[in-house]
Image (cartoon, rainbow, N blue to C red):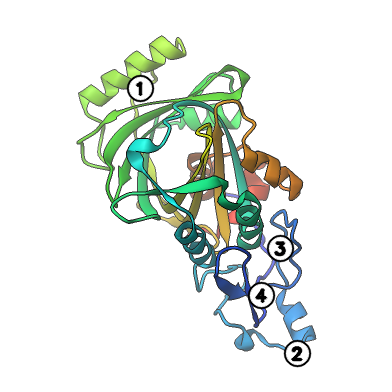
Amino acid sequence: MPIIHRAPLIACGPTVNLPSTGCRIPAVRGLSPGDRGLPFASLASASEHGRSADDTQVHVRRGEGFVGRPYADALLAGVAARLPGMELDDVPQLMSRVDRKYIVTAATMSHLAAELGDRFQVLRIDGRRQFRYTSTYYDTPDLLTYHHHRQDRRRRFKLRTRTYLDGGGQWLELKLSGARGSTDKHRIPYDGAPGQPLTEEALDFARDTLLKELHLVAPEPMQPVLATDYRRVTLIDQSGGARLTCDTGLVCRDGHRRAPARGDMVLLESKSADGRALADKVLRGLGVRPVSVSKYCLAVAALRAQPANRWHPILHRYLLPAG
């Protein structure tokens, strides 16, 4: 696996109020409102301002970024707390949609939340507004679906089980990417053990769906490759045509190694029927552009010695070294 060099990152002492959230997090020098995920101030910069690494509010080792405290989690908890809740049964499904992903800092997330204002609600289940997810991804021994995504094949898919740890059960999900950049998600309830070979019923579902929707014969064998854990806040446009998922605390693992995401970053996914969601417009105005990547592809690139040149900049910004 290629060695990724990261600039040292630190928090710089004072706290600042994040607009519209009521949260206070350590101030970060070198971060502009239109931040596109550029590195924060270095240890040298801190000493130039009369602060040593020991003076910072968070213990940070070289190259690790904000790992001492979950800044992004605190921010999203504040965002979710101030918005009106929407129950799960009232959330539009959007199973066929246009997806756009973004990786942003907590500061950019704060600006986005302020711009979105009160036009969004937050998913609420049994009083909770932030939820834990675990996904196990299935692929062939030679990682065929990973390479199809890396090569940007027009017809490709991801197969996973997803467990909603705070309610919502467990599902087998098949995400299909087809023409015009659209994404279709098909799923069925799943009662098999996470991380174990799929049941025959699940394999039949995958075979039938791939043949019907993409005219593909399912590759075999499909086996568990790795898992991801993270926390999510889901914002729903009150117009009903879009939603924005906000993921923090991502950890990629394969039973041998783990690769966590930086604690000050948020992985956003804008989902809309026509690809013209308000969140996309606001992010463009903040100078943020979408990225073409998935959690599965990032995890494989971080944990396995696989070609991943197209994702090196994202790995550099978002994930800490695997260990």
- Left or right, 74 with reference to 179: left
CA gap, disc 2 and disc 1: 60 Å
Question: Which mark is drawn over residue 220?
Answer: 1
CA gap, disc 3 and disc 1: 42 Å
Q: Earlier in the sequence, mark 3 or mark 1?
A: 3
Q: Is residue 15 above or below residue 78?
A: below
Q: Earlier in the sequence, mark 3 or mark 2?
A: 3
Question: Which mark is drawn over residue 50?
Answer: 2
Q: Which residue is mark 3?
A: 39
The amino acid type found where label 1 is placed reads Glu
How many neighbours does mark 2 have within 10 angstroms: few (below 14), some (14-19), or many (20 or more)?
A: few
Q: Earlier in the sequence, mark 2 or mark 1?
A: 2
**Disc 2 element:** loop
How many neighbours does mark 1 have within 10 angstroms: few (below 14), some (14-19), or many (20 or more)?
A: few
**Disc 3 element:** loop
Question: Which mark is drawn over residue 27?
Answer: 4
**Disc 1 element:** loop
Q: Position of residue 46 (x, y in %)?
A: 73, 81
Q: Nearer the viewer, residue 179 or 207?
A: 179
Q: Nearer the viewer, mark 1 or mark 4?
A: 4
Q: Position of residue 95 (x, y in %)?
A: 44, 27
